[in-house]
Image (spheres, rainbow, N blue to C red):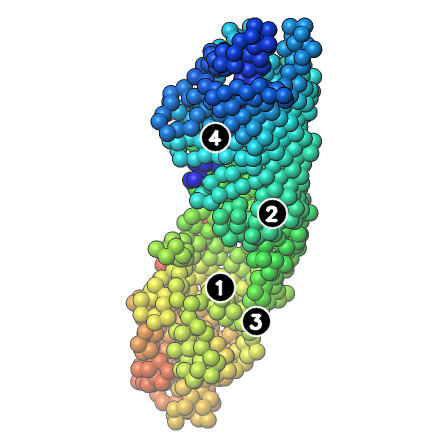
Amino acid sequence: MTREGGRGALRAFGGVLHSFLRILGALFVAAVLLGSGLGWYAYRRFSPEDARRMAADQLTAMLNRRVTIDRLVLSPRGLKVLGLRVRRRRPVQGEPDLLSCASALVTIKFRPLLQRRLEFDTVILQSPRVDLEREADGTWDLADVFGSSTTASGRGGGAIPLALAAAETMVRDGTLLVGDPRQGWSVSFDGVSMRLDSFNERAPFPVKAAFKVTDRFGGRQLAADVSADWTVDLAGLHWSSATVRAEDLRASIAGAALRGRGAITGFSPLRFTLDLDAPTLSPEQWRYFAGRGLPLTLPPSRWHLEAGLPAPGMFDIEKLTLDTPAGQGRMTGLFDFVSDTQTLSLELAADDADLAEVGRWWPALAKRSLSGRADLRMAITGWPGRLQARDADLTLRDFGASWGRGRIKGALARATATDEFSRVEATVAGATVAALGSEFDAVSLSAALTEKELAVNRLGLRWNGSKVVVSAKVKMRREKDRRTRLTDVVFSGSADKVDWEAAAKLVAAFRAEISTRAAAPDEEASARPWVRTFKYSIPHGFPDTAGHIHVGEVTQANFWCKDVDMLWTLRGVTPALDKASGEARLRFGPGRVSDIPAVQASNQFLSVVFLPFVFMQKMNNLSVFSAGTAYPKTLDFAVVEGEYGAAKGVATTRYFHVASPQLAAYAEGTADFSHEKVDMNILTRLTSYRGTLPEWWVDELGRPAIGFRVVGDLSRPELQPRFKKIGADEIETKVAEGRARAAKRFRALERLLARLEAR
């Protein structure tokens, strides 16, 4: 059976329950009239054939169906009826009858019979069968059974209680089939056994019943054995007040023994309640239910259902609760089977769920070491196979979880999804996170996610004794392989202070986490020239970025500075660096570099920042300088600033400026990282120099001033001294021009980042 089976079964549920007494009544009325035939036979000496014809004719008139009876047999135990059949409204060759019964035994109380009253002692139905089908016009074949009961019985509905009015009524090995040939589904109730004692239409009476229900759903056959002791109250045939209660309901499904109680409270409209206690449900049992692997072990649980059929084709779940050791889950919902497109609408909720307990149910969650409590609300619409979560709210209190070498604890987190999960908003407060080899505390977050964008309105934390605040906007794209790729990142961040070595380790750990390229062994990395090491540290899939970072203080073993401020935009970055383009502005100071070569050797990024210093140090090797002391290895500076551009992998130093008590420096030029080539002009003016310099290395005011050009291989460049005096204010003029150009270029980016930082 397809998924229509479950839908059809529910759609038929109300009709089957409401018509159950009709079905039995049809069989029992036959026994009643046959009993009447026995009475006539006794007092008028009719033949058995006359009694058979009379019973068949009256049943035909009463049921609006052609009724046949094969034989009547009078035995010492009573009247035995063989081969009772009720035909369909529109019989089709080869289709089964609507109602059939292999044999029925009726015994009559003879004392009331002598007083011209018909009272039954026992009615036993052997192997009755009911085939209930939906016809092409959408109606059920049982719809007009007893349509003429007023005529037959003298009052509406009276045939049913008359038929059931026996001291004892039993059904043995009965079968009920319910199906819709148009939609290709059917449900069978086999092995139906029932015992009804002391029938009374105005007072409660007991019924014992058991059956096996079988259904084909999603290509699988599902079966359950059900038995119960019922108490039935027909409320004088006022169906809206009639009740059926089962105080001891038992069911067995896939080896799971369920026990509980249930009640039908009113047949028009139909409403019912059900309470079930379920044992532990294993993954194998969930596989039986769902038809696929589901590694869930649900501990013993208690289910409570209140539902009804408020209108034809509507199934209303007024309340469904699930009580487990982790807490209680709740659901309400409505199933609509009559619309052209069947739909359901469900509301799910859970309060104060114990996440540690929930984590034990699912192996994947057990690995996460969940802790804390959770509240959940979710709205679902659609239909099985096309379900959609419309919106949801989730709150996690004192939340903890682990993954790999990471761990979060103590978090208060809230998430809200709206517009069919097209937008998700989340907040986090008070969390402590261990990840990437570091620990972050006082973590707070405010973020929003859509299909195409992640907006981090604010991420705040304390790391390594520093307060860090970050804002970002990330644009995403879904690739053909269904993976999400980050395409654009706009970022703004600030930190009180940063330890350079700790930050470098954090960046390396993050890069390794997101990179698809296997990390190179340390020996291999150290054997490369620094340029290649820098290039190959860039991960694949690097997004286009723009951002602003401000750090109050940076410390490193050989480097210290305050007020680091960096603004950048960067596009097309790959490890080859042949398509990279963008621009950046960097400013920091005051500060001190205690060992310039050591700083350059310690980090690839610092090697790029201090690239002009690399070449200044190489100038010390020229024989014209005494003892290599032209450029100091230790430098105190007021400010270091620069602007950089990139196009097609070629980086341009638009201007680089150092203001220091020891020297003033300016640099401009290009560095082609793709081909590892450099062409850069550097101007420097020294505060003092104890040796003697050539005339061209003294500026127009007589101060030591050295200019040179760097060309060739980035790792082994050629230095070409400038044989022209540097102007008195040439360095200051070039710096002013560079600053003006940078201000103009970065004006739009500054406005964009100001809006981001103001959120």
Please state which of the two labelled residues, at mark 3 or mark 2, is closer to the viewer: 2
- Write the residue at 56% across / 65% down: 404
Q: Earlier in the sequence, mark 1 or mark 4?
A: 4
Please state which of the two labelled residues, at mark 4 or mark 3, is closer to the viewer: 4
Nearest the camera: 114 or 707? 114
Compute the Cα span from label 1 to label 2: 68 Å
Left/right of residue 744 with respect to residue 170 in the rendered view: left
Compute the Cα span from label 3 to label 2: 58 Å
Residue 273: horizontal and vertical position, in percent?
63, 30
Instruction: Look at the numbered discs 4 and 2 and tell me whether their residues touch, using CB distance below 8 Å.
Output: no
Please state which of the two labelled residues, at mark 1 or mark 3, is closer to the viewer: 3
Decide: is 214 above or below 562: above
Instruction: Look at the numbered discs 4 and 3 and tell me whether their residues touch, using CB distance below 8 Å.
Output: no
User: What is the quadrant of residue 167 in the picture?
Assistant: top right
Label 3, on which residue? Answer: 502
Label 4, on which residue? Answer: 178
- Write the residue at 57% across / 19% down: 74
Compute the Cα span from label 4 to label 3: 71 Å
Disc 2 residue type?
A: Gly
Disc 1 residue type?
A: Asp
The local crowd at label 4, few if under 14, some if 14 to 19, many if 20 or more residues have their Cα within 10 Å, is: many
User: What is the quadrant of residue 517 in the picture?
Assistant: bottom left
The local crowd at label 2, few if under 14, some if 14 to 19, many if 20 or more residues have their Cα within 10 Å, is: few
Left/right of residue 350 with respect to residue 564 in the rendered view: right
- Write the residue at 39% across / 28% down: 95
Label 1, on which residue? Answer: 565
Compute the Cα span from label 1 to label 4: 76 Å
Label 2, on which residue? Answer: 255
Element class at badge 2: loop
Q: Earlier in the sequence, mark 1 or mark 3?
A: 3
